[in-house]
Image: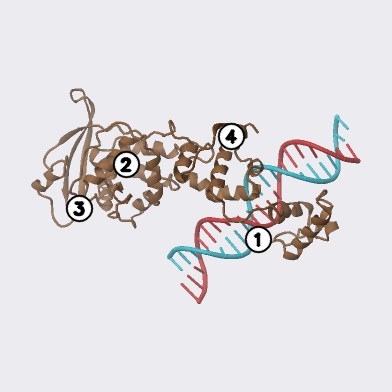
Chain colours: A brown, B red, C cyan
Amino acid sequence: MRRSAEFDDMSGLKKGPWTPEEDQKLVDYIHKYGHENWRALPKLAGLNRCGKSCRLRWTNYLRPDIKRGKFSEDEEKLIVKLHSLLGNKWSAIATRLPGRTDNEIKNYWNTHLRKKLLQMGIDPVTHRPRTDHINLFNALIGNLPPQLLAAFTSSFINTNTSSINPQFDMNNTLTNSLFSDTTQLIHQIQLLQNSSLLVNSLIRNATATTSPLNIEALNQILGSHNQLQEYNSTFQQFLSNSSDSLIDFGLKSSNVNAEFTHANNFSGKLDYQEINDTKLGGDQLILSGTCSTSSSVIGNDQMKNISKMPNENTSDIYPKQELIMQPSSASTSTFEAWDQIMGNEEASDSYWRDISNH
DNA sequence: AAGGTGCCCAACCGCGTGTTT
DNA sequence: CAAACACGCGGTTGGGCACCT
């Protein structure tokens, strides 16, 4: 039973799912007499239903030309395109998909396609890249010290295997939230090739890194410093706001050159101070910190192998990162993004203009 | 194995619009 | 012209079922 109340209290008419006998009565009647008057039909067909229920059953289920089964990729693509042009005009969309009902398309949209777009970082209403989570990410990463940024980026991905580095503890909530869908992350990055700086930095850091930073260590870092705790809090907020989707990457500027060449079982903490020194060219970060493995404190010699990792007793000065998350909408439309993911050919412009004019 | 949880989708509901009286 | 009727559309519901713990 799909509906609890089997009969309408007021009218006494039956509600809920249709039995095979009822279906047969309806089909037989319509084959014989058609369906000119839905209101009168149920009585004439011997059905204890309202006309509306009969019409719905016929149009959404019993009609002989209804196509059943999974939506093809072409159909998915068509629905997305039509939705971007027509919005939630399901009946209008359905007229372009032979054998599919508006109800079926609406359900498919709400249960599958909507989520798919969200995972692609596309707003299913506007069909433009999502921006809600980007602001939060900006807040997080905009002032992130280079070491931490490098820690994030170099730990993201193994470009040789096109997968998330297995060193990540996937049971870690934070990691799990961020990398819940590897394929999705890779798609995201592939889609946003214009943001080549980030991709390049991902590749550079990933390939240069034999042992990426342990995420637990990263959490330790984030949790051990007041100011970093703010980042952490923002980051958590960011994660909670982007559960359906990862990040629409866009990156400006360079200087992502801090490399963790050897950070196996890294743990420790970073201290940094933000200053504005005109001699040094404006905003600067003064970084200092300690670094140790799980078994022993890293000595100064080993410390030198960690490129640009500040020595315990020294302070290094780095230019402040100019990392700005931005929507990649400039060149990647929904259609293009979809096509890239689906690997399909783009239909002609005139075709879509034609549809949108209807 | 049993109970809990979340997803899916058939069917319902309310409302807007067009047609008839 | 207004009221009643009929239809169709889009949003929402909730039972079944698969999956998870």
Q: Evaluate if marks 3 and 4 touch, with contact meaning CB atoms under 8 Å apart.
A: no
Q: x, y (%) of residue A239?
A: 39, 46
Q: Is residue A293 left or right of residue A56?
A: left
Residue A180 placement, left or right of A222: right
Q: What residue is rendered at 29% in x and 52% in y?
A: A165
Q: Residue at x 12, y 38 (%)?
A: A314
Residues at circles 4 and 1 in contact by the CB criterion of under 8 Å = no
In the image as oriented, which residue stretches furthest toward the left?
Answer: A301
Q: CA distance from mark 4 to mark 2?
A: 48 Å
| Cα distance in 3D space between marks 4 and 1 | 40 Å
Check disc 3 and report the residue beneath it: A264
Question: Of residues A281 and A331, which is closer to you in this image?
Answer: A331
Q: Which residue is mark 4?
A: A351
SS category of the residue bearing label 3:
loop
- Mark closer to the observer (2, 3): 3
Can you identify the residue that label 1 sits on? A2
The number of numbered badges drawn on the structure is 4
Q: In what element is the residue under mark 2?
A: helix
Which residue is under mark 2? A231
Q: Amino acid at mark 4?
A: Tyr
Alpha-carbon span between mark 3 and mark 4: 56 Å
Gap between marks 1 and 3 measured at Cα: 56 Å
